[in-house]
Image: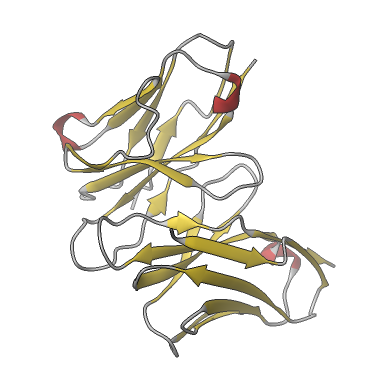
């Protein structure tokens, strides 16, 4: 079974530029998550989708970050304009679904963003 | 507010030297506690889910246990390939499927 795919793996941009990350979840997984992991810290949830609807985006800095999940499969996370403090690894994860049960989240390899 | 504290921050073991990693948590009703392994440059890899106090799960040299306030990841006779950062995360009983992660324990096993 193919895992969560992400691209690009690395990106270096200057502050105030824009950047976009792509994620393809595990086939059949209805729920998709974007996390930000700053060096030396655990991942922090940015946004959660179930199918193509947003379940939780309370931690997403909406003045500069946006995300979409068209057709309930692939997802794109965008930052515009980027700040120095956005330097981090952006992780995409997927799980079977959100409900009353507990479903393991499976992570992609991440995109390492460096803002200079 | 949910809190997850992992200790120690870093741990160096000789090959074969058993030890335990700790994850203490504060959450409004625990739905699940998760352990992940993260290798440098990679995403977290799922290891275990624990649901209730007293539960234990094992995988190879790893054994995870859960109490009402903390979880332990016991590593028996570790090998160099067990070197990684081990992350603990909690999911609270209400709301969405969000995971709240600790900062991890960086384990190094020396041959």
Residue B44, image x and y in percent?
Answer: 51, 53
Residue name at image x 20 percent, y 50 percent: A28
Q: Is residue B88 visible?
A: no
Residue A70, image x and y in percent?
Answer: 18, 29
**Left or right of A11 in this view: B75:** right
Colour option used? secondary structure
Above or below, comparing residue B18 to residue B107 in the picture: below
Q: Dividing the image into 4 quarters, which one contains the C terminus of chain A?
A: top right
Q: Quadrant of residue B42?
A: top right
* Tally of marks: 0
Residue B48, image x and y in percent?
Answer: 45, 71
Residue A16, image x and y in percent?
Answer: 52, 9
Q: Nearer the viewer, residue A111 or A39?
A: A39
Above or below, comparing residue A98 to residue A82 in the picture: below
Q: Quadrant of residue B50?
A: bottom left
Q: Is residue A67 visible?
A: yes
**Left or right of B71 in this view: B98:** left
Residue name at image x 51 percent, y 79 percent: B69
Above or below, comparing residue A102 to residue A39 in the picture: below
**Left or right of A2 in this view: B84:** right
Residue name at image x 30 percent, y 47 percent: A26
């Amino acid at each position: 079974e193919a895992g969560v795919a992400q691209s690009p793996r690395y990106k270096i941009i200057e502050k105030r530029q824009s950047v976009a990350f792509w994620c393809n979840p595990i086939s059949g997984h209805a729920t998709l998550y974007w996390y930000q992991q700053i060096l030396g810290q655990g991942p922090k949830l940015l946004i959660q989708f179930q199918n193509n609807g947003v379940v939780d985006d309370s931690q997403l800095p909406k003045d500069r970050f946006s995300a979409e999940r068209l057709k309930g499969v692939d997802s794109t996370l965008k930052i515009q304009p980027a700040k120095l403090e956005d330097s981090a690894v952006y992780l995409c994860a997927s799980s079977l679904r959100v409900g009353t049960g507990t479903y393991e989240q499976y992570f992609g390899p991440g995109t390492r963003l460096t803002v200079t | 507010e949910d809190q997850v504290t992992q200790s120690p921050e870093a741990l160096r073991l000789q090959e074969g030297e058993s030890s335990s990693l700790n994850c203490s948590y504060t959450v409004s009703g625990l739905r699940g506690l998760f352990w992940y392994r993260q290798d440098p440059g990679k995403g977290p890899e799922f290891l275990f889910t624990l649901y209730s106090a007293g539960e234990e799960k094992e995988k190879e040299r790893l054994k995870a246990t859960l109490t009402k306030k903390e979880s332990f990841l016991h590593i028996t006779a570790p090998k160099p390939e067990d070197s990684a950062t081990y992350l603990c995360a909690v999911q609270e009983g209400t709301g969405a499927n969000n995971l709240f992660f600790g900062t991890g324990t960086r384990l190094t096993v020396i041959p």
